[in-house]
Image (tube, grey):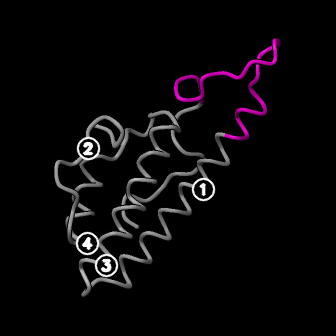
Amino acid sequence: MTGNKTAEPNPPRTLAGVQEALERSRPARQAPLTEWLGYYQQSTAWYAEVAEIDRGHHHEALYCAEHERGHAEEIKAQISAQQRSESNDDGEEVDYGKNREAGPAEDVDASP
């Protein structure tokens, strides 16, 4: 299961809930960068929302949101670099959601 294929019916409302939901929705290592980007964007949003709900973990959730935002920015940069370097002879861009090297450039921790 990937973060982009199924949405949580009810968004997590605790820090532990976010971590469990992200574990279930983590893309496969070989998943397209676009899936990883969606995963990190979702995790950023969940952590930021939970920071306001689960007040006992406010600062930790904010840290996690910023950490995940950093991963999303790195993947955006990787996608942009691929788009610049992998355009075909006609100047058309390749579909980077499918045609690319697998996974994020660096191995990313499962935990923030």
Of mark 4 and mark 3, the one earlier in the sequence is 4
Residue at which label 1 appears: 73
Q: Secondary structure at mark 4?
A: helix
Write the start and end of the magenta stretch as one range: 80-100
Secondary structure, magenta segment, majority class: loop
Three-letter code for the amino acid on which mark 3 is drawn: Glu
**Which image quadrant: the C terminus?**
bottom left
**Which image quadrant: the N terminus?**
top left
Q: Secondary structure at mark 3?
A: helix
Cβ–Cβ below 8 Å for labels 3 and 1?
A: no
Of mark 2 and mark 4, the one earlier in the sequence is 2
- Within 10 angstroms of label 4, few (less than 14), some, or many (20 or more) residues? many
- Name the one closer to the observer, 10 or 77: 10
Q: CA distance from mark 2 to mark 4?
A: 17 Å
Residue at which label 2 appears: 7
The residue located at (38%, 85%) in the rendering is 59
Residue at which label 3 appears: 52
Q: Whole-percent x and y of residue 100?
A: 59, 28
Three-letter code for the amino acid on which mark 2 is drawn: Ala
Q: Whole-percent x and y of residue 63?
A: 44, 77
Cβ–Cβ below 8 Å for labels 3 and 2?
A: no
Q: Which one is closest to the eye, mark 2 or mark 4?
A: 2
Q: Which one is closest to the eye, mark 4 or mark 3?
A: 3
The residue located at (35%, 68%) in the rendering is 47
- Within 10 angstroms of label 2, few (less than 14), some, or many (20 or more) residues? few
Q: Secondary structure at mark 1?
A: helix
Left or right, residue 36 beside residue 61: right
Of mark 3 and mark 1, the one earlier in the sequence is 3
Queried whether the magenta region covers residue 59, the answer comes back as no
The residue located at (66%, 21%) in the rendering is 94
Q: Secondary structure at mark 2?
A: loop
